[in-house]
Amino acid sequence: MFIHDLSPAAGSTHVDKRKGRGHATGNGKTAGRGHKGQKARSGGGTRIGFEGGQMPLARRIPKRGFNNIFAKPLEALNVDVLNKFEDGAVVDAQALLDAGILSKCKYGVKFLGNGELTKNLTVKAAAFSETAKQKIEAAGGKAEVV
């Protein structure tokens, strides 16, 4: 095999359509744009979200409050899921993923105070609610913010 023998896999490449290059091409004259009208013009067409003059959906829907587009959403877990771990274990995001409690953890975990905790654990997470922290410490464990 030589370098000049190499070629792309069959069907992986195609020849681009050459618009407006005569009748024989099948894309001559109007070049696939039809006859006249807004979309036939150069620069023609409408902006994204335009609905022909009707009030657009983005403006019809009521908006309230503030939506932070830079927010990093944490995975929320209740303290009762920690009972799955052995006494004295160190629980972090990776341990939760390995145990199958979480399927993904992009930005970190926040523990909430729902349920009861019976194990003495060192829990490392991005955030804790006040009740979650109290329950972990009441069980003899430690809540560490990472």
Image: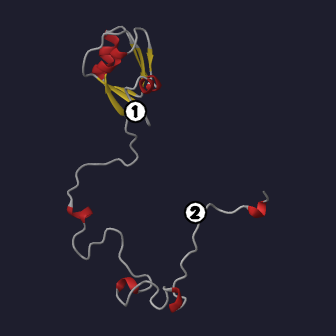
Left or right: 67 as drawn, with respect to 42: left
Residue 50 on image: x %, y %: 30, 72
Please give the name of the residue rendered at 38% of the width and 82% of the height, measured from the top-left corner: 39
Q: CA distance from mark 1 to mark 2?
A: 35 Å
* Secondary element type, mark 1: loop
Residue 125 on image: x %, y %: 42, 25
Q: Nearer the viewer, residue 40 or 51?
A: 40
Residue 78 on image: x %, y %: 30, 24
Residue 134 on image: x %, y %: 30, 15
The dot on residue 113 is none
Amino acid beneath label 1: Ser
| Quarter of image, res 41 | bottom left
The residue that disc 1 covers is 103
Amino acid beneath label 2: Ser
Q: Residues within 10 Å of mark 2 (few under 14, many from 20)?
A: few
The residue that disc 2 covers is 12
Q: Nearer the viewer, residue 89 or 130?
A: 89
